[in-house]
Image (spheres, rainbow, N blue to C red):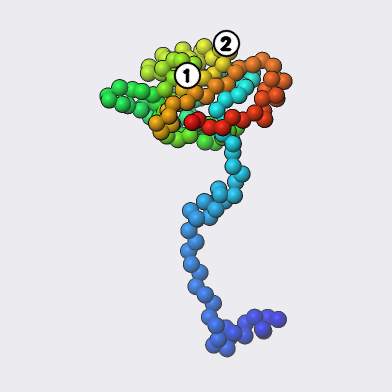
């Protein structure tokens, strides 16, 4: 068997093909293409205990996991343009906030000063809902999560996706 495999090369026949460099970016794109599509949600139900676990980490936690830059129009701050949204936490993949979205307000409060972020962060501890106003392209949308203390309410809502920001 070894003789047969080495025969063409040893007898001056076929030469082994030269190896070509494979573009790693192509293969990374192929593996991403095979990942299941994540259905984005504009809202739903959020357990207060889960929200409090995030809030207890402080506003710096949000700033470490959400990349933003100021979004200006006519020299005025209109919101913050999202560059990344919890890229290392798959649980947030279902949230319909994507790079390029401009967050204009949270629970009706425009965040233009660091104190505004802290005020919203503090108020969320007892808020009945989390609402995020977002500009995507030329459309304004609102993402809304009801904050509940009851696990059963979250389980009832788990299958009720309602599409993306329009």
Query: Mark 2 or 1 closer to N-term?
Result: 1
Foreground of the two, 147 or 60 = 147
Tell me the crowding category of disc 1: few under 14, some 14 to 19, or many 20 or more residues within 10 angstroms, Cα based: many
**Residue at (65, 28) in percent of width and height:** 160
**Front label number (2 vs 1):** 1
Q: Is residue 109 above or below residue 98?
A: above
**Residue at (27, 25) in percent of width and height:** 74
Q: Are marks 2 and 1 in contact (CB under 8 Å)?
A: no
Answer left or right for 152 relative to 133.
right
**Residue at (44, 26) in percent of width and height:** 140
Instruction: Report which residue position mark 2 lands on.
Output: 126
Q: Position of residue 36 (x, y in %)?
A: 61, 44
| Residue 17 seen in render | yes
Foreground of the two, 59 or 95 = 95
In which quadrant of the rendered image does the N terminus lie? bottom right
Answer left or right for 28 relative to 115.
right
| Residue 125 seen in render | no
Name of the residue lying farthest toward the bottom: 11
**Residue at (64, 80) in percent of width and height:** 5
The quadrant holding residue 51 is: top right
Q: Position of residue 43 (x, y in %)?
A: 57, 25
Q: Position of residue 44 (x, y in %)?
A: 60, 24
Instruction: Report which residue position mark 1 lands on.
Output: 106
């Amino acid at each position: 068997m070894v003789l047969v495999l080495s025969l063409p090369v040893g007898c001056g026949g076929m030469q082994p093909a030269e190896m070509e460099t494979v573009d790693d970016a192509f293969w990374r794109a192929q593996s991403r293409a095979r990942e299941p599509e994540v259905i984005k949600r504009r809202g739903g139900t959020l357990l207060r205990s889960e929200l409090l676990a995030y809030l207890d980490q402080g506003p710096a936690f949000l700033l470490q996991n959400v990349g933003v830059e100021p979004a200006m129009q006519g020299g005025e701050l209109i919101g913050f343009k999202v560059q990344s949204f919890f890229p290392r936490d798959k649980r947030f993949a279902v949230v319909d906030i994507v790079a390029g979205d401009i967050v204009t307000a949270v629970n009706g409060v425009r965040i233009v000063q660091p104190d505004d972020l802290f005020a919203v962060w503090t108020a969320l501890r007892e808020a009945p809902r989390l609402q995020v106003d977002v500009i995507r392209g030329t459309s304004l949308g609102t993402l809304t999560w009801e904050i509940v203390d009851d696990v059963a309410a979250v389980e009832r809502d788990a299958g009720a996706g309602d599409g993306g920001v329009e």
